[in-house]
Image: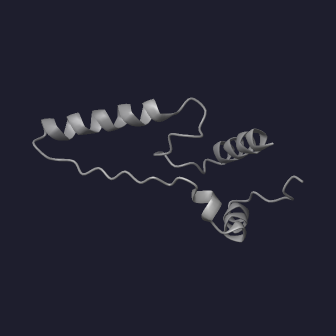
Protein backbone atom coordinates (compact mmCIF):
# COMPACT_ATOMS: atom_id res chain seq x y z
CA UNK A 1 0.00 0.00 0.00
CA UNK A 2 2.84 2.39 0.86
CA UNK A 3 4.55 1.87 -2.53
CA UNK A 4 1.26 2.46 -4.36
CA UNK A 5 0.69 5.70 -2.42
CA UNK A 6 4.27 6.81 -3.09
CA UNK A 7 3.90 6.13 -6.83
CA UNK A 8 0.64 8.06 -6.93
CA UNK A 9 2.18 11.06 -5.14
CA UNK A 10 5.17 11.04 -7.51
CA UNK A 11 2.82 10.98 -10.50
CA UNK A 12 0.71 13.83 -9.06
CA UNK A 13 3.65 16.11 -8.31
CA UNK A 14 5.20 15.47 -11.72
CA UNK A 15 1.89 16.02 -13.54
CA UNK A 16 1.37 19.44 -11.95
CA UNK A 17 5.06 20.43 -11.84
CA UNK A 18 5.08 20.72 -8.04
CA UNK A 19 8.40 19.01 -7.37
CA UNK A 20 11.46 21.09 -6.58
CA UNK A 21 14.32 21.25 -9.06
CA UNK A 22 16.60 20.29 -6.17
CA UNK A 23 14.57 17.16 -5.32
CA UNK A 24 16.61 14.06 -6.09
CA UNK A 25 14.92 11.21 -4.26
CA UNK A 26 11.41 9.94 -4.91
CA UNK A 27 11.50 11.07 -8.55
CA UNK A 28 11.65 8.69 -11.49
CA UNK A 29 15.21 8.45 -12.77
CA UNK A 30 16.69 10.54 -9.94
CA UNK A 31 18.54 9.45 -6.84
CA UNK A 32 21.51 9.93 -4.57
CA UNK A 33 24.02 9.58 -7.42
CA UNK A 34 22.39 12.51 -9.26
CA UNK A 35 22.66 14.65 -6.15
CA UNK A 36 26.31 13.77 -5.59
CA UNK A 37 27.16 14.42 -9.25
CA UNK A 38 25.51 17.84 -9.09
CA UNK A 39 27.32 18.67 -5.84
CA UNK A 40 30.66 17.55 -7.27
CA UNK A 41 30.19 19.70 -10.38
CA UNK A 42 29.26 22.70 -8.26
CA UNK A 43 32.29 22.32 -5.99
CA UNK A 44 34.64 22.08 -8.99
CA UNK A 45 33.05 25.13 -10.64
CA UNK A 46 33.36 27.23 -7.48
CA UNK A 47 36.93 26.04 -6.80
CA UNK A 48 38.04 26.91 -10.34
CA UNK A 49 36.54 30.39 -9.89
CA UNK A 50 38.68 30.97 -6.80
CA UNK A 51 35.69 30.96 -4.47
CA UNK A 52 34.49 28.56 -1.80
CA UNK A 53 31.30 26.61 -1.25
CA UNK A 54 29.34 26.12 1.93
CA UNK A 55 27.41 22.85 2.07
CA UNK A 56 24.83 21.96 4.71
CA UNK A 57 23.58 18.40 5.14
CA UNK A 58 20.36 17.87 7.07
CA UNK A 59 19.11 14.45 8.11
CA UNK A 60 15.32 14.33 8.14
CA UNK A 61 15.03 10.73 9.30
CA UNK A 62 11.49 9.97 10.47
CA UNK A 63 10.35 13.47 9.48
CA UNK A 64 6.85 12.32 8.59
CA UNK A 65 6.61 10.21 11.75
CA UNK A 66 6.89 13.35 13.87
CA UNK A 67 4.90 15.68 11.57
CA UNK A 68 1.29 16.55 12.29
CA UNK A 69 -1.07 14.35 10.26
CA UNK A 70 -3.49 17.28 9.85
CA UNK A 71 -0.66 19.54 8.67
CA UNK A 72 0.41 17.03 6.01
CA UNK A 73 -3.19 16.63 4.77
CA UNK A 74 -3.61 20.42 4.66
CA UNK A 75 -0.47 20.86 2.56
CA UNK A 76 -1.50 18.08 0.19
CA UNK A 77 -4.98 19.64 -0.21
CA UNK A 78 -3.41 23.05 -0.81
CA UNK A 79 -1.64 21.44 -3.79
CA UNK A 80 -4.96 20.07 -5.08
CA UNK A 81 -4.38 16.50 -3.85
CA UNK A 82 -7.55 15.54 -2.03
CA UNK A 83 -9.55 12.42 -1.33
CA UNK A 84 -10.01 9.81 1.33
CA UNK A 85 -6.94 7.97 2.61
CA UNK A 86 -6.95 4.21 1.94
CA UNK A 87 -8.22 2.02 4.77
Residue 59 position, x and y percent, is 45, 52
Q: Image check: 13 left or right of 55?
A: right
Q: Residue at x 61, y 47 (%)?
A: 17
- Which quadrant does the N terminus fall into? top right
Q: Image check: 86 left or right of 38?
A: right
Q: Residue at x 59, y 38 (%)?
A: 27
- Quarter where residue 50 is shown: top left
Q: How is the image coloured?
A: one colour
Q: Residue at x 29, y 33 (%)?
A: 41
Q: Against 28, is 73 above or below? A: below
Residue 80 position, x and y percent, is 73, 59
Residue 55 position, x and y percent, is 29, 50
> Farthest right residue?
87
- Quarter where residue 40 is shown: top left
Q: Residue at x 19, y 41 (%)?
A: 46
Depth check: give the residue in front, 60 or 20: 60
Q: How many marks?
A: 0
Residue 57 position, x and y percent, is 37, 51
> Farthest left residue?
50
Q: Image check: 26 left or right of 32?
A: right
Q: Against 75, is 40 above or below? A: above
- Which quadrant does the C terminus fall into? bottom right
Q: Against 45, is 81 above or below? A: below
Amino acid sequence: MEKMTNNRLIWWFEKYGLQSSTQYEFLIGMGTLNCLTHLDSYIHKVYQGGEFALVLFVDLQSAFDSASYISILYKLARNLLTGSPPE
